[in-house]
Each structure stands twice: as structure tokens, then as C-alpha cells.
Amino acid sequence: MQIDIKGLKKSFGTNSVLNGIDLTIEDGKTTVIVGQTGCGKSVLIKHIIGLLRPDAGQIIVNGADITKLKRKEFGGILKNFGVLFQNSALFDSMTVGENVAFPLREHTGLSPTKIMDVVREKLAIVGLKGVEQLYPAELSGGMKKRVGLARAIALDPQVLIFDEPTTGLDPVMSDTIDNLIMNTQKHLGVTSIVISHDIPGTFKIARWIAMLYKGKVVLYGSPDDFRNTQDPIVRQFLERRAEGPLQVEA
């Protein structure tokens, strides 16, 4: 599923966050969105999944501008999206199996037996077996991410969105999650959108990278385009330098 974002603008009071975003999320590929904290990455994602409405611009999905759809109309589109939130957002009072089953119970008419079959299938895809009866408090951070991903793919979405999936994980587990993202994208053939601050991980998983700065895309291209660019803003970000044109707020 391709997503075309055209001239997207959003302000909160006098704070202009998105200043005319133009970006194409290519079908069946992984696009990583990078940039400083507060540059508009999360606000952009919230527009894509319908949590926010823009002040101007379009988001074209399957030929329809979803910014113009009514809530009920957008519901049909939303089922095509799966989201892995930064903190996994699991329900602490539910078991792993119940967490993964939640969207199936809410949005399908499958029998309890069939739902559990799907739950086990999705957990196997993310490398977890036999954990259905455990609770989130019994899981490591990496396992929680995997359970969150299993829930995100429960409805067989066409688009997967990862909100800083390696935040708070050690380098080894971060690489494990990167491998999981790549394997999931390859196995399911989905369109993946990843918000990340992890530069090595970005270069590993991305087919395309978009860097936001002051609410606009300052560079969109392949990992090699980013490695080879001489743009001072992009270079400062990639090299993790405090000195340069990027404004760093204390």
C-alpha cells in the first residue's frame, strides 16, 4: 500500500509543527523517518493513522484522501494499519494471548478457537512460542516488543508503523528487533514506516530514509544517498555533533 503525503501542514496554537510535508511511502518497502526530537515525526504518524487532522494538505491512501474521510469511513482504512508503539502499550491485566487476541475479538467474527490459532501463528512469526499464558510483567523489554508486534500484525495489515522500536533496548536487543522488522517485512510483504533515532539501525533496515527538520523533509533517499550527502544539517545529525546548523535546545 503506497501512501502519498502532499503539502501537509499542522500547527498547535502559534507552534507550527508540520510546514508542508511532501513524502511518498513506497508500497512494500521500509521507510525510516529520522530527525531531532520535536521535528514532527510523531505528529506526522498521528496524521497517517487518523489521530490528528491537518490544517492543510493531503494523505492519499488507495486513491482516497483520508484527511477528508468521516470517522466511520476511515475505520475501514484503519484496519489496514498495524502499529507497534514505543512502549509496546500492552494491557497489563491481560495475558500475552489475550493481548494479541484483542484486535481479533474487536474487529472479526472469528470463533475463540480460531482466534487462538491466529494468536499462536502471529507469536510464532515474531519468534515467540508457548508464552500465551504469561503476563506483560513477566516479560523482558525485547519480548514485550515482540508481543506488541504480534498484536500489530494480528489483522494482517498492509502497513506496519514502528514508533521508535529500539528505544530503551541494549545494542544486542536493538539489533534483534531490527532483524525482526526486516524479517516481518519480508515475510508479510507489508509497507513499513519506522520512526527512529538509531542511525546504525536505520541504515540496516531502510530502503528509503526521510529526514525531517523544522517540519519539512530536508532529504529523502536511499541509505547511500544519506551516507554520501554533503548537506550540513544531515551530516551533523548523522555524525551526532552538537556543533552545526541544527539548533539544539538546552
Image (tube, grey):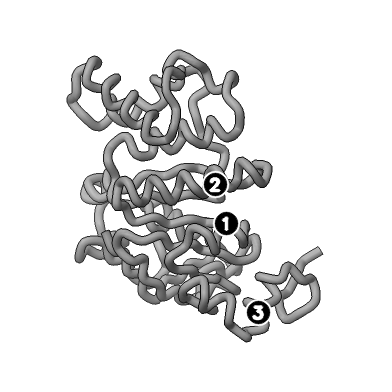
Q: Distance between the residues labelled 1 and 3?
A: 20 Å
Marks 2,1: beta carbons within 8 A: no
Q: Residue at x 58, y 47 (%)?
A: 175
Q: Which mark lies nearer to you, 2 or 1?
A: 1
Residue 68 can be seen, yes or no: no
Residue 36 place in picture, x, y as percent? 64, 65
Q: Is residue 242 left or right of residue 154?
A: right
Among numbered discs 3 and 2, the one appearing first in the sequence:
2
Q: Residue at x 23, y 15 (%)?
A: 113
Task: Name the amino acid type tagged 1.
Answer: Gly
Q: Residue 165, labelled with which disc?
A: 2
Q: Which mark lies nearer to you, 1 or 3?
A: 1
Q: Residue 201, labelled with which disc?
A: 1
Q: Quadrant of the C terminus?
A: bottom right
Q: Quadrant of the N terminus?
A: bottom left
Mark 2 residue element: loop
Among numbered discs 1 and 3, the one appearing first in the sequence:
1
Residue 132 place in picture, x, y as percent? 42, 18
Task: Name the amino acid type tagged 2.
Answer: Pro
Task: Name the amino acid type tagged 3.
Answer: Ile
- Mark 2 is surrounded, within 10 Å at the Cα level, by few (under 14), some (14 to 19) or many (20 or more) other residues, namely many
> On the image, numbered disc 3 is attached to which residue?
233
Q: Residue at x 57, y 35 (%)?
A: 142
